[in-house]
Structures are given as C-alpha cells and as structure tokens.
Amino acid sequence: MMPPHAKAQGVDEPNAPAHPNRARRFARPWAYFVSRLDPRPQALFSPMLPIFTAALAIAIFIFDTVTPYEIAAASLQVVVVLLSLRFCRKQGVIFVSLGCAALSILSAVLTIVSYVPTAGSTFSLGVINTSISLTAIAATAYLALATETARQTAERAQAHLAHVARLTTLGEISASIAHELNQPLTAVITNANAATRWIRSEPPNPQKVTSSIESIVEDARRASEIIARIRALTTRAEPQNAWVDINAVIQEVLVLIQSQLNENRIVVRAELNNGLPSVFGDRIQLQQAVLNLIVNAIDAIGAAQADPREIRIRSRKTRPSGVEVSIEDTGGGLTTTDVNQIFDAFFSTKTGGMGIGLSICRSIIEAHHGRIWAEKGEPSGATFHFTLPGTQEANQ
Amino acid sequence: MNLGAPATRTQKSTVAIVDDDPSVRKAISNLCESEGFDVVAFSSTAEFLRWSIPETPVCMVLDVRMPGENGLDFQVELAKSHAEIPIVFVTAHGDIPMSVRAMKAGAIEFLTKPFRDQDLLDAINGGLAKSRMRRNALEMNAELEARYQSLSNREREVMDLITKGQLTKQIAATLNLSEITVKVCRRQIMTKMQANSMLDLGRMSEKLERMRSGPAELR
C-alpha cells in the first residue's frame, strides 16, 4: 500500500496551513478532493466504488427521511463510512463521516418537519435513535481512522524493513558495484593519458585530443550515474509512486549487477518486450524486487555449480493491461515444499541465507497489487514470476 | 648465417583488444592509437576468433572477466590452437593465484585496472617484440625449407653426407659418383642454400632436422 501521491506534490502535509495557491494548483474543482483519495490508479480498483458509496449514502438519506422518525435508518451510514476506507485516506474518511453525520441530522430535521403533526408521540424516541445513529457513525469513523493509522504504521515498518534488506543486498553486491565504477574510471584515466600523448605527438593531433576529452566526459558521466543509482537505492525515502517502465527497471538493475554476473560467469538472456504497459509504483522498490530475484538466481547457480550458467529474464504483456516478468535460472531448482514456502520470511534454502530477500519481494509485489510465484524448472532450475497491473495504453 | 631479415624492419604492429566494456575498450584503443599501433577491438573472445589474424606482429590485450567466459581459459584454448599470440591481461581486481596462472601459461603481463599507461604500453611492446621474433623465426624456417626444396635429389643426398662429415672422396665412393660430380654438387648446394661455410651448412641441416621432427612450430 502506498502513501498518497499527493504527498509528492506537497499538498498533503498534515500541519501545513491552508494556502490560497493550493486550490489553484488543481485545474478542476474536484481535483483537490480527488488528490486526497488513495492514489492507487483507477485501474486497480473499481472507479465505480466512490460513486456507488455516494449513491448508497443518498439512498440511506432518502430512506431515513421518508421513514418515520423513530426508525434509525441513519445508522446504516456506518456502511458508507466503512466503504470509504476502501478508497480514502485519513482525511477522506473524516470528510465522509462528517458528511454522513450531516446527512443524518438533515434527514432528522426533514423527518421532524414533515412528520411532527402526525408523529409527535414518538419524537423523544426518535431523538434517542438519531443520537444512537450519530454515535454509531462517530464510533465507526473512529475505528476506521484507527485502522487507517495502523495500516500506515505497518506500511512504514515495511518500508524500513525493505530499506534494511536493500542495504543488505547492496552489501552483498558491493564488489560488483566497485567493479562497475572502476570500469569508467579506468577509461577516464586511460583516455586522459592518451590525450596527453596526442598533444605531445609530432605534430599534435587536436582532433584526437578533443575526442579523448569527449570520451572522458562521457565516462565520468557514466560513473556518476552509477553512483546516483546506488544512492537512490541506499536512501530511505518514502515510497514515491509514479508510472514506471518495468523494462527500464530491469536494465538498471542489470547494470549494477553486471560484474557479479561476470565474476560468476553467468550469461543473462534478457527478452524484454517492447510496448509494455507502464506500471504504477515505486521505482526503487521495484528495482529491489528485481535485484533480489536476480541475486537469488545467481546464488542458486553458484550453489549448484550448474552448467549452463544462465539467467533468462523475460517481460511480457498480460491481459488486459498488466505486465509479467519471469526470471529463470539454471540452478539447483526447488522442491514442492520450497515452492510453497519460499516467499515466507526466514525461510531459506541457501546456506547462510536469512530468508528475507524473497519475502521482501513478495511484500513489494503485493503492495503493488501484483502477484508473485515460483515454479520448478525442467529438468533443473527455477523460475520466478511476478505480475503487476498496468495502464491501458502501451508504453513508448 | 645470413638467414632472414633482422627484427628491425619497420613493420606495422597490431594490438587486438578484447574487453566487454565499451568505454574501457574505446579508451585502450585510443591509447594504443596514440602510440601508433593498428588497433582492432572486440567485445568477446568469440568475436576475436572470427578475426583473420594478419601477417604482422600481433599482441592481445584481454580482460580476464567477461560475460560467460574467463580470459584465463581462453588463453589455454588459444595456446592449444597453436595461434601463439602474446597476451597482456587486464583485470579489475585480480588476485595472486589468477596472475600466477596467467603468467605460468605464458602471459606477457597481468595488469590491474586502472593501470599506468606506460605499464600497458611497455607490456604491449614486449608482446609485439615476442610476436615479431616468432614471426621472423617462422619466416626463416620457411625460407630455409624453400632453399632445401630447391635442391635436386642427388644434391640432398650429397648434402646429407657432407653434414655427416664425409669427405668428397668418401661421398663419391658411397654414392658411386666421380669426385668431380660431387665437387660440382657441393658448389651447387652452397649456392642454393646460401651457406657461407661448411659450418653454416651444418647448422642449417641441423635446423632442418629439428623442423622435420616436430610440428611446424617455433623451435
């Protein structure tokens, strides 16, 4: 579960004073309210749910109004409050609860106005029932808010754990990262030496000097890109949701882990389909999930002394608009028990494995409303698949 | 003996670079070009094997660690295929066993990235010198063989006996020839083999003997 997208836009800070500019940031009047909704893309849950909830609230309101005053139909509004939890954040739930309470009072007033002449005898009973309804709504709102807070705490704890796991994985692949940085640095030094030689040569070759310097700039940029990538993985930031190209995520991970693959003499065959739908989620977390799966595959191949040493990464579109990524290794493979338990925390088939990597993968993928599963390979090896929901429109 | 040209010929030398990393490949190419070498670069050893090795001296700069293969294994393979190309290894983090293995298998040098430019160029020059010597020796062998082939059967028989230390008289008796004929043969042999002295001819014969007894390799 992701915190509000609105956070990124600086709209949702709890203590921020109301700002006149704030309303102007939204082109459409309802956009402000929508920004307070859960940011999960509409594709992930029925866009009809808020409409249905609103319709239900009005139906209850009408029912409450037309029934005699002593019938506490307004208490049914608790259903509306609970439903709002499905698509609203804290403030949204408060908003809905207040709305429900207001509707109850309004309905009570209307009922009294229209029924007073005929239903005077039950007026006191009606007041009690209205109070009960309001209390029920308030109690439900309180519980809903408590649930939401608990969910956010759990989310934060999970983000912490994911961060720790990321650091652990990065520690494991630090040699790979060092190598990956050493390459462009070697190129920089070598090109600089070459440039000196081109200047000193008789006659000097300015064209070659220029091209050498251009290469140096290019290589240095590559080095800093690698550092930026590592930095992104090590900083503990709140998840930032955006539309992400899963193929780019896979390629970024492959850059970081390339030399680990080389060292283990593992060949990666990436069959990444173009035109995949974008997926909505946190780029870093998705990188982590892919990274963990690849590190897992490397370990499996290393442990099995497998031949051929190969990891096959495929990405493809699923119906109607999701993506599926599969990572297949030629390692020792899994038993049926493994397949069922492999994503459980502290379950590991590796000697010295903590059993964290894959369980983190699962929590990341599930938080992105996807699914992850493992399969035994034939005759050996294992394949890990995950799916993620995406947009209707193809990427690119 | 005046066999073959000395190694001072100003021949164009080729450096073959095999590294999977494009920027490192480009940088080493650049450095080698600045030193005036011809450069060919490959991203894998498989690609290198498809290259037709030129007649000029060649030195190879090889990355130890590449996707799916190991430079050290390739060194052994290359040696087996008799393509004796001197190899300079470069690696990001080589350890001692790795470098020992490479040097034992005949590597020119084992450099750790990032290397000093002069170290690499010195190693390449060393490799090229080795390649040039080897090439010259092979040329000399080929030349010697060609001269020997130009002899007639009789001349070869006579040469064989000369180098065994027999005198003209003895040769004439052994082959049932006149002494004059043997003398004429002898002069012919000295001319065709371009030998300056009997000692020189003896050395050539010894060399030919050795070339016959093994594969067409440098001895």
Image (cartoon, rainbow, N blue to C red):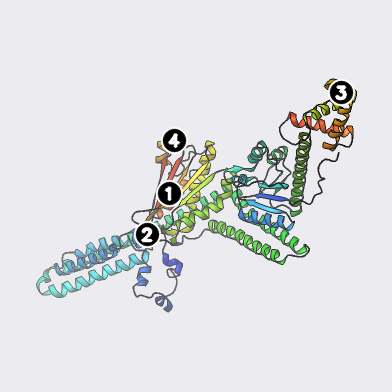
Q: CA distance from mark 4 to mark 3?
A: 78 Å
Residue A99, percent from left and from top: 28, 69
Residue at 30% across / 67% down in the picture?
A96
Residue A322, percent from left and from top: 37, 55
Q: Residues within 10 Å of mark 3 (few under 14, many from 20)?
A: some
The verdict on a common chain for dots 4 and 1 is yes
Chain to which mark 3 belongs? B
Judge whether residue A74 can be spotted in this image.
yes
Chain to which mark 2 belongs? A
Name the one closer to the observer, B41 or A304.
B41
Residue B198, percent from left and from top: 89, 32
Q: How many marks?
A: 4
Q: Residues within 10 Å of mark 2 (few under 14, many from 20)?
A: some
Residue at 78% across / 63% down in the picture?
A202
The verdict on a common chain for dots 2 and 4 is yes
The residue tagged 3 is B172
Q: Residues within 10 Å of mark 1 (few under 14, many from 20)?
A: many
The reply to whether callout 2 and callout 4 are in contact (CB within 8 Å) is no
The reply to whether callout 2 and callout 1 are in contact (CB within 8 Å) is no
Is residue B12 positioned above or below B82 on the image? Answer: below
Q: CA distance from mark 3 to mark 2?
A: 117 Å
The reply to whether callout 3 and callout 2 are in contact (CB within 8 Å) is no
Q: Which mark is residue A148?
A: 2
Which image quarter holds the N terminus of chain A?
bottom left
The kind of residue tagged 1 is Arg
Residue lying furthest left: A118
The residue tagged 4 is A379
The kind of residue tagged 3 is Ala
